[in-house]
Image: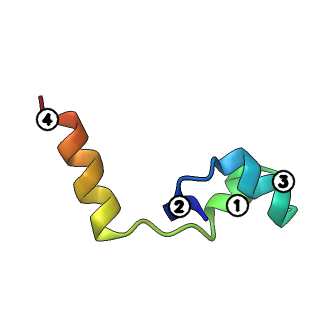
Amino acid sequence: MSRAGIPLQVIQEISGHRSLQALQWYLEVSELQLEGAIAALRF
């Protein structure tokens, strides 16, 4: 869901995690996401 752009707070609510910290344990960051974030930083 996070890769689809759904906010983490919404995913937290749907998944029933009590905190974002607990949810983040299950989140993975793909190479494509990293590349997109780095590209967004370049002006």
Which residue reaches farthest front? 4
Specify the quadrant of the image occupied by residue 22: bottom right
Q: Amino acid at mark 1?
A: Leu
Q: Residues within 10 Å of mark 4 (few under 14, many from 20)?
A: few
Q: Which residue is mark 1?
A: 23
**Between residues 20 and 5, which one lies in front from this camera angle?**
5
Query: Going 27% across and 52% down the picture, which residue do you hit?
Result: 36
Cα distance between the residues tagged 4 and 3:
33 Å
Distance from Cα at disc 1 to Cα at disc 2: 16 Å
Residue at the top extreme of this rendering? 43
Is 41 placed left or right of 15 in the picture?
left
Q: Earlier in the sequence, mark 2 or mark 4?
A: 2
Marks 2 and 4: CB-CB under 8 Å? no
Q: Is residue 10 left or right of residue 13?
A: left
Residue to which mark 2 is pinned: 4
Q: Position of residue 15 (x, y in %)?
A: 81, 65
Which residue is identified by label 3?
A: 13
Q: Earlier in the sequence, mark 4 or mark 3?
A: 3
> Which quarter of the image is occupied by the C terminus?
top left
Q: CA distance from mark 2 to mark 4?
A: 23 Å
Measured Cα–Cα span from mark 2 to mark 3: 16 Å
Residue underneath mark 4 = 42
